[in-house]
Image (cartoon, rainbow, N blue to C red):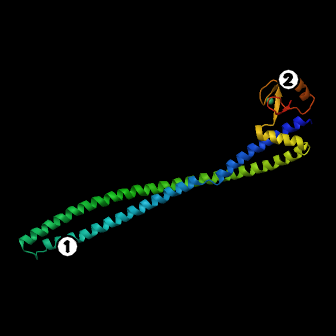
Amino acid sequence: MDIARQLYQLQEIDLEIESDEKALNGVVVRLSDNRVILEAQGRLTSAERQLDELRKRQRTAEQETEDLVVKLTTAEGQLYGGRIQNPKELASLQHEVELFKAKRSRLDDGVLAIMDEVERAESGLAAAATALQKLETAWNQEQQALTAEAAKLRSKLTDLTQQRQSLSAGVDPTVAGVYDKLRKQKGQAVARVEQGVCRGCRISLPSSDLQQVRSGNLVYCSSCGRILFLP
Ligand SMILES: [Zn+2]
């Protein structure tokens, strides 16, 4: 095999290694990324807190109502019990009973409003729990697929590295050095020659260079400096 073909094949392997390494990095990043789950867990926790808070408010409001009912019952007992005869006192009690009743009505409305809020918060909590469960299922499936993908890429990279080693074993170290330098500088060290044109820089090659390439010699493009390869 002539040297240009050998280097071109080396480059094919190197480009594949490069792209597989990039893919592997992407997979590894996604493997450790559980932000979606953490965010959903955060929403669930906040829904739980909100519900707890509302239930506390409900209990407080209900307690307040119970206390008021005791006061109202006592006042009504005094009002209708017949032990108090003084009209002024009775009028004052009557007034007190009315105030208690009005307050009780306000408290009842408040309790009903909180119960509505509790109901909505319970639905919100259930929705957050379902959403988290769905995300966790999808995430676990994705992680399994990504783990398999990473294993596949790692094994492929091992094969490619072995192929590269055996292919580059026969390359002269000086030429290998030039190849590595060009790869670093230009991304592609070896350019195909198609219809007399260097595909690396799209410049027409002098016929003397083409002749050299055809003979299987190591020729560098006089324009871009890449190693020329005639397929
Ligand atoms: Zn060129």
Residue type marked 1: Thr
Instruction: Check disc 2 and give the amino acid type.
Output: Pro
- How crowded pointer 2 is (Cα within 10 Å; few <14, some 14-19, many 20+) is rated as few
Q: Is residue 148 left or right of residue 135?
A: right
Left or right for 59, reference 155: left
> Residue 74 bears which disc, if any?
1
- Return the x and y of residue 129 as percentages of the image width and height: 51, 56
Q: Is residue 191 left or right of residue 41?
A: right
Q: Which residue is mark 2?
A: 206
The residue depicted at 6 percent of the width and 71 percent of the height is 87
Q: Looking at the picture, does residue 189 appear above or below residue 92?
A: above
Percent coordinates x, y for residue 186 in the rendering: 76, 37
All told, the count of numbered labels is: 2
Q: Nearer the viewer, residue 57 or 104?
A: 57
Mark 1 or 2: the one toward you: 2
The reply to whether callout 1 and callout 2 are in contact (CB within 8 Å) is no
Q: Position of residue 83 (x, y in %)?
A: 11, 77
Please name the residue shown 74% across and 45% down the image.
Answer: 20
Frontmost residue, 43 versus 212: 212
Q: Which mark is residue 109?
A: none
Q: Label 2's element?
A: loop
The CA distance from mark 1 to mark 2 is 115 Å
